[in-house]
Image (cartoon, rainbow, N blue to C red):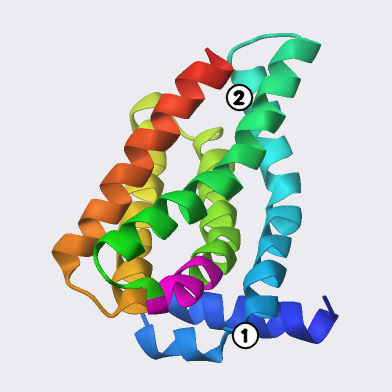
Amino acid sequence: MTRSEILRALDAAFDLVRLRAASIERFDLSVEGFWKSFFAAVLTLPAYILMLWIDSARSEASARDGGDLVGAFIFYLMGWIIFPLISLVLTRFFDLGGRYVPLVVAHNWVSVWLTAIFVAALVASLVVPPPIDRSLLLMALVGALYVQWFVIKAALLTTGLVALGFVTLNVIVEQTVSRLVLG
């Protein structure tokens, strides 16, 4: 991917986070653009590593052992596979297959901003008292779920209820995989 392609995609994703549905059309919605959108996983990997480090420091563990790190990395990779697979099944079920590519492309690029927001909340939670730290993280989580719902609704040109179904199933599957992989 070129720098300009990345910046264009991140700009469109930022507008989606700001709840501007029309910005979906600014993504490269070709098959090539679909595959390129997974570059967002490379961009979010440093933030994921930082979150693991903060989690390790918070739990007062001196360091994660190799098995924990391997499991965390597997979970990270699976997170980039689960949503597209769930979406493939659900878009076909709801006869929305023609909007599958815009959905995955938008979801992938928006993930970069949602990860950045969550990392900011996580870092901020380290310097505030306990009742506020959890509130910050909860607000970031609720905000991220709302943005996911909005992106799904806008990308699929569907109802809020259908979008809620996508979000709910994605959360359930990711939590199940998390428990299986990470214990």
What's the residue at 48%, 77% (across, down)? 102
Q: Is residue 135 above or below residue 58?
A: below
Indicate the secondary structure of the residue bearing disc 1. loop
Q: Which residue is mark 2?
A: 55
Whole-percent x, y for residue 125 in the image:
50, 36
* Residue found farthest to the right: 2
Asked if 104 appears above or below 141 in the picture, the reply is: below
| Picture coordinates of residue 161, whole percent (x, y) | 14, 62
* Quarter-of-image position of residue 68: top right
The residue stretch that appears in magenta: 98-105
Crowdedness near tag 2: few (<14), some (14–19) or many (≥20) residues, C-alpha within 10 Å: some
Judge from the rendering whether residue 21 lies leftward or rightward of residue 51; answer left or right. Answer: left
143 falls in the magenta region: no
- Mark 1 burial class by Cα count in 10 Å: few <14, some 14-19, many 20+: some
Q: Residue at x 46, y 84 (%)?
A: 24
Q: Amino acid at mark 1?
A: Asp
Distance (Cα) linking label 1 and label 2: 35 Å
